[in-house]
Image (cartoon, rainbow, N blue to C red):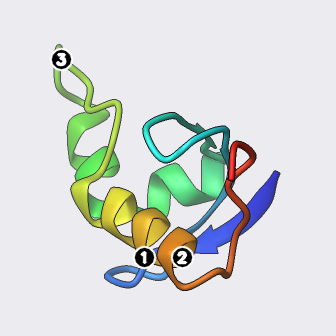
Amino acid sequence: MEPVECDRCGCRVLVVKNSWQHTSVQWTAEARSTCQVLDDAADSVSRARSCPAMQESIARAAVEGRIGVLDD
């Protein structure tokens, strides 16, 4: 797993890009509390499972070569 920092809020998650379509993300407790999207959803019945800004940050990191894509 490789660390990726969100371009929006700066929280850091661990990521494995198995392919361009499949990404595994490990959210730490600190990252969950730092991310406004996930923190806001923590009190909601339907908790957010993902953050669009983090998804974009991960995609950008892969395109820029900052993280590897295993099936490449």
- Tell me the distance, in whole angstroms, between the alpha carbons under discs 1 and 3: 28 Å
**Mark 3 surroundings within 10 Å by alpha-carbon count, few (fewer than 14), some (14 through 19), many (20 or more):** few
Say above or below: 18 vs 14. above
The residue labelled by disc 3 is: 46
- Residue ID for mark 1: 60
Q: Are marks 1 and 3 in contact (CB under 8 Å)?
A: no
Image coords of residue 35 (percent x, y): 38, 61
Q: Secondary structure at mark 1?
A: helix
Residue holding disc 2: 61
How far across and how far down the image is residue 7, in percent?
39, 84
Q: Nearer the viewer, mark 1 or mark 3?
A: 1
Q: Residue at x 28, y 61 (%)?
A: 36
Q: Earlier in the sequence, mark 1 or mark 3?
A: 3
Residue in the picture at 60% in, 44% down: 27
Q: Nearer the viewer, residue 8 or 18?
A: 18
Q: Label 2: few (<14), some or many (≥20) within 10 Å?
A: some
Between disc 2 and disc 3, whose residue precedes? 3
* Amino acid type assigned to the residue bearing label 3 in the image: Ser
Is the residue under label 2 in contact with that under label 1 (CB below 8 Å)? yes
Left or right position of 16 against 56: right
